[in-house]
Image (cartoon, helix red, strand yellow):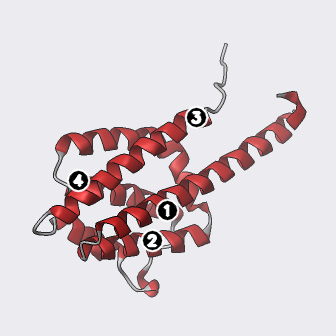
Amino acid sequence: GWQVKPFDFDYFEELYDVRTILECAAVRKICEQENNSPKLDDLIRIWCVPESERLEDGSTLSRLDERFHEMLVEAAGNTEMARIHHDLTERLRIIRRLDFTKPPRIDATYQEHSSILDAIQHRRCEQAQIQLRAHIESSRNEVRKITLHMLHEARMHSGESDNDD
């Protein structure tokens, strides 16, 4: 028979921790480079746009957000770091997509990505890392909140109560 495995928050928390470490290390490497990577220029073209040019489709933005973080790591120039990060991205995808179900998170993502890129362009490494950590943490918190709500709703629809755990 089929059995649904319980959602393992600790596993995803650990993945987020590793992701944050990799991305912050990538930002440091980018800031230490003499010239900007073409990938960084591509990210600026996508994320540093006027509000009127921002996309609103959650599914499209989810893919673009995923590529933002992957391209940031790729721009550091370390292929092994990028490979590991890509593997993390694959494992986190199932929950990260939940982050783009609410319009305020879409606006926040544009603002936060733009601010991170600006700090990187100006070689303000620590500022970029602080903003990146805060950005990832906001996303992680939103995804956690949505996941808990969805699990609660699923229990309610299946006839369970919260006391059945």
Q: Do the residues labelled 4 and 2 touch (CB within 8 Å)?
A: no
Return the disc, 3 or 1, that comes first in the chain's sequence: 3
Point out residue 109 in the picture as x, y percentages from the top left corner: 48, 68
> Which numbered marker is on residue 74?
4
The amino acid at mark 1 is: Ala
* Along the line of sight, the residue nearer the viewer: 137 or 56: 137
C-alpha separation, residue under disc 4 versus residue under disc 2: 19 Å
Return the disc, 4 or 2, that comes first in the chain's sequence: 4
Report the residue at 22% width, 65% height from top: 31
The amino acid at mark 3 is: Asp
Determine the secondary structure under disc 1.
helix
The amino acid at mark 4 is: Glu
Does residue 71 appear anywhere in the picture?
no
Q: Mark 2 points at which residue?
A: 112
C-alpha separation, residue under disc 3 versus residue under disc 4: 27 Å
Q: Do the residues labelled 1 and 2 touch (CB within 8 Å)?
A: yes
Q: In the displayed image of the protein, which residue is found farthest to the top? A: 1
Q: In this view, does 146 lie to the left or right of 13?
A: right
Q: Name the residue under label 1.
A: 134
- Seen in the picture, residue 165 relative to 90 is either above or below; the reply is above
Determine the secondary structure under disc 3.
helix
* Along the line of sight, the residue nearer the viewer: 2 or 27: 27
Report the residue at 40% width, 86% height from top: 50
